[in-house]
Amino acid sequence: MSNSYRPLEVVIESALGLENVNHVTRMKPYAVVYMWDIKNNLRSSKEISSADAEGGSNPTWNFKVKFNIDIAMAQENSFALVVKLRSCRRTHGVRDKDIGEVRVLITDLLEGAAGKERRMSRSVDTYSDESNGTEQGQGELTFSYKFKDPTADDPTLLHITKKRNRRQVIRKLAKLLGPVVLGGLVSGLTSG
């Protein structure tokens, strides 16, 4: 395996001037962060911040997310960092409401990143049913990011090793590899 994986740390800091999509109650925005490719395939798990109940249209999260990205594949398939902003409305038995989203190509993040932490602000886009596309919405999202040194580690296995105990690791590996492959591994892990 080549050293093509690069850890990316993103901190979703805050937003300013978001459109108030709650008409009765105070807006409680949260962020859903993930990787997407040009063919609209999900390329990572979706990480969800807590809702900011106090900030309204100017929320603050300081929500840290880590991805391990195959840079060659990300460039080839135009991977994008997606931050979808939603408003929590569960207290009223109603579905959460979309505020808008920000998409940034990984290639744009890589430009001039060279191991330094960078800060970026982007306009929040909204979807319009009439135009069948996105249009510039209201507000701006601010986040920081940093690429770390390349690693040869498979991101799936990195995610698994975050688990706290051996049984959870074994169960996750069993789902990925199947019970036959794990016969020797299970006896080795449980005897140690």
Image: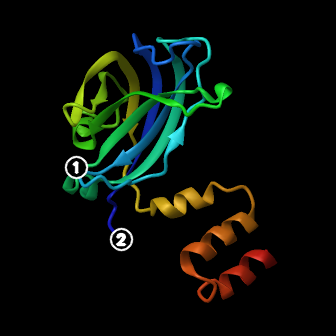
**Residue 97 sits above or below residue 186 on the image:** above
Residue 48, x across and y down, in percent: 54, 37
Given residues 188 and 166, the one toward you in this image is: 166
The residue carrying mark 2 is 1
Secondary structure beneath dot 2 equals loop
Q: Are marks 2 and 1 in contact (CB under 8 Å)?
A: no
Q: Is residue 55 above or below residue 191?
A: above
Q: 124 and 106: which one is in front?
A: 124
Quadrant for the N terminus in the image? bottom left
Crowd tier of the residue under label 1, counting other residues whose Cα lies within 10 Å: few below 14, some 14–19, many 20 or above? some
**Residue 76, position as x, y percentages in the image:** 20, 56
Q: At which x and y percent is residue 123?
A: 29, 21
Residue drawn where x is 40% and y is 34% of the image:
83
Q: Can you tell which mark lies on residue 78?
A: 1
Relative side of 130 to 55, left or right: left
Q: CA distance from mark 2 to mark 1?
A: 22 Å
Q: In terms of depth relative to the viewer, which is nearer, 83 or 98?
A: 98
Q: Please, is residue 102 above or below residue 166 in the view?
A: above
Q: Amino acid at mark 2?
A: Met
Q: Amino acid at mark 1?
A: Ser
Occupied quadrant, residue 187:
bottom right
Count the marks: 2
Residue occupying image coordinates x 29% and y 20%: 137
Left or right: 27, with 90 as reference point: left
Q: Residues within 10 Å of mark 2 (few under 14, many from 20)?
A: few
Q: Nearer the viewer, mark 2 or mark 1?
A: 1
Q: Residue 19 placed where, x, y %?
A: 40, 14
* Quarter assignment of residue 171: bottom right
Left or right of 55, for residue 133:
left
Instruction: Give whichever of discs 2 and 1 has the lower sequence position.
Output: 2
Identify the secondary structure beneath mark 1. Answer: loop
